Amino acid sequence: MARDNSRFWGFVTGNMPGPLLIAQAKAMEDMGLGGIWAPQVYGPPWVALAACAAVTQRITLASGIALAFVRSPFETAMAAMDLDRLSGGRFVLGLGPSVRSWSEGFFGMPYGRPVRHLREVIEIIRLVMEKSHTGELKSYQGEYHRHDWTEFQPLATPIRTRIPIWIAAVRQPLIRLAAEVADGVIGHPIWSIDWARDQALTALQEGLRAAGRQRSDVHFNAWFWVVINPDRKEAINDAKATVAFYAGIEQYEPYFAAHGFGEEARRCQRWVKGGNFAAGAQEVPDEMAQTFVICGDADEVRRRLAPVFDFVDSVTLVPPIGGLPPEKVGAYSQAIVETFYV
């Protein structure tokens, strides 16, 4: 009997050569995975997803994530409807605020208060999806965005007027927002398994109760970094640069502090802010690496992940990439395939 891989999601990136991206998309559909993500690092995810749409027929395609504040919500809505049309109704719009240094520093766009800002962005996107074809799209005046559509020419009816929107989250406020207004929540790969179970799930349940919604109303997809390697010490060391990168983001310090690694995160920040990611990895002790990255041989990784399926709807397994040569990242990606998908 063929293995049921529908609760696993894979990913492609926009910097892949075209033939490789197409081959991976086809392979993920052939293996029966539930979905394919494309992230925004740093260009928009739409191009990679359009390529996937052209060579697949069944698998869900999702932005994982599109940065919510670096473009007009109107443009995001239009891109989502285009991709939903290209894919025949298979698109999921994954959105997240990312961090202030990316939006304001890299992209030169205002960040504001992320929960309030993201709520407004989603409201505008939904408005455009629902009314861009009816002649009723007129104006929007918000705290962060103002739109005048008086000269807008209505579009053809979209494939769907309510494309699913999933919110990416690290901590509880965005999880609660997802429970209230979105169709799914995307767990950040920096999540530990304990955090996903004890903190994220609790916040999701609280948000659902407050909004009068059911658990079935919100899809829960959790990402986890995985290093499958029989050499445990090598696996742990290979995880450290990726952990250091995220620990070096000041905005994430409270998350690491909640796990007891606040001081380590502050030391990583000093190196990462100076652009010395390799030195930042030296500040990550073995215990910290193993908390945020699932390290071990195939049997151990399978064992540690097994309980996750009791409380999430789907998972996305990704290899760490920080400080690793492409051939090693490729080997770790292949190990995930061999351990879980075939």
Image (cartoon, rainbow, N blue to C red):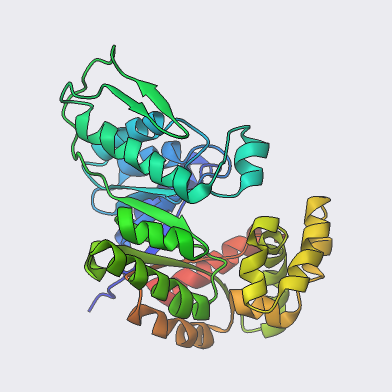
Which picture quadrant has residue 127? top left
Q: Is residue 87 left or right of residue 177?
A: left
* Residue at figure coordinates x 52%, y 72% from the top left: 335
Do we see residue 81 in this rendering? yes
Depth check: give the residue in front, 295 or 199: 199
Which picture quadrant has residue 153? top left
* Residue at figure coordinates x 47%, y 61% from the top left: 173
Quadrant the N terminus occupies: bottom left
Q: Is residue 98 above or below residue 261?
A: above
Image position, residue 334 (x, y; %)? 51, 67
Which picture quadrant has residue 260? bottom right
Image position, residue 22 (x, y; %)? 41, 46
Depth check: give the residue in front, 30 or 225: 225
Number of disc labels: 0
Image position, residue 250 (x, y; %)? 70, 57
Q: Is residue 102 above or below residue 224?
A: above
Do we see residue 6 in this rendering? no
Quadrant the C terminus occupies: bottom left
Q: Is residue 326 left or right of residue 44?
A: right
* Residue at figure coordinates x 35%, y 71% from the top left: 206
Image position, residue 252 (x, y; %)? 64, 61
Depth check: give the residue in front, 140 or 183: 140
